[in-house]
Image (cartoon, grey):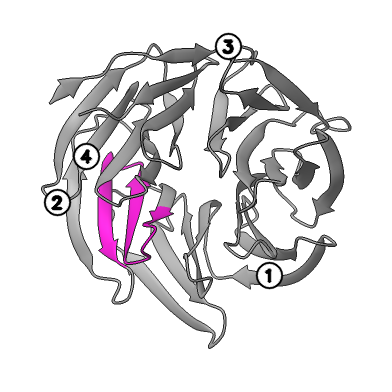
Amino acid sequence: MQDLIFVNTLKGHSSAVMSVAFSPDGRTLASGSQDKTVKIWHLVNGESDTLIGHGKSDWFGGVNAVAFSPKGQLLASGSDDKTIKIWDVSKREEIFTLSGHSEKVCAVAISPDGQFLISGSHDKTIKVWRIENGEQILTLNGHSDAVLSVAFTPDDRAIVSSAGGNDKTIRIWYLANKKLLTLAGHSDWFAGINSVAVSLDGKIIASGSQDKTIKIWGRENGKEIHTLQGHSDWVCSVAFSPNGKILASASKDKTVKLWDLATGQIIGSINYQEAVYSVAFSPNGKYFASGGGDKNITILPVDL
């Protein structure tokens, strides 16, 4: 296992960074923070623009999730203020606000075709929205606790979600035929699943849990392939490298770990001063970014 070295640290948030996402061209990075702001970082010079709008009418307004559209022209953010905002990335302006959840929004994702947005909330629902006009077109009910993570499959055929509390399940919602596949296997009485990710080929799903483990699942049959063990506290975020060979995981144990998916072994690890809440790979797979309780974003090379 190789220790990794910091390449760059982006500073500017005044509270914990809960979510990071690279733009499709890899030239910018978005971050959402408990300071109620979204920042768009220029990765060439480290400068940032700040998007303000969440939490204006509510004491709660932390930003839990950010996601770019496939062409990078739009950015979605989900907040403790129960709303999702859609931003014009080039103009750095809010386009509109999506309201409909009755509790805080924990997760957002935009479909690969760029037409739809999904959101997961503490109200135990997943909502599907039409991006072009902000219309809410569907609500998915079934989780018994807060929906903490959502993702689209690359073929747009299904939505993948995970929930916290005593739900402890991953659900695959096939929208065309209404089929629902439920994956269960994470342990502990109260060990919710904080994060799910789908590989770019759509064949496998990774889940990071409060039981300190990561599980790898076959998407089509829902069978557990193997369990990755090595964190000593909650796993908060998981992300596949673009080539599907490496998984990154961020944890409350103050580390980010890189895993070889072929062997299930840890191949890289870095220590932080505080819990790490989010991790994302750059589109070319050469870097990953992480954000956490130290209020900073760290960008590191995947050079193993």
**What amino acid is labelled 4 in the image?**
Trp
**What amino acid is labelled 2 in the image?**
Ala
**Residue 4 in the figure: left or right of residue 200:** left
Tell me whether circle 4 and circle 3 mark residues in contact (CB < 8 Å). no
**First to last magenta residue range:** 197-218
Q: Regarding mark 4 in the picture, which secondary structure is present there?
A: strand
Q: Residue 11 got which mark?
A: 3
Is the residue 274 above or below the residue 231 in the image? above
Q: Residue 139 got which mark?
A: 1
Task: Judge the density around disc 3: few (<14), some (14-19), many (≥20) Cα neighbours within 10 Å.
Answer: some
Q: Who comes first in sequence, dot 4 or dot 3?
A: 3
Q: Who comes first in sequence, dot 1 or dot 4?
A: 1
Q: Residue beneath label 2, please?
A: 262
Res. 236 in view: yes
**What amino acid is labelled 3 in the image?**
Lys
Q: Residue 247 got which mark?
A: none
Tell me whether circle 1 and circle 4 mark residues in contact (CB < 8 Å). no
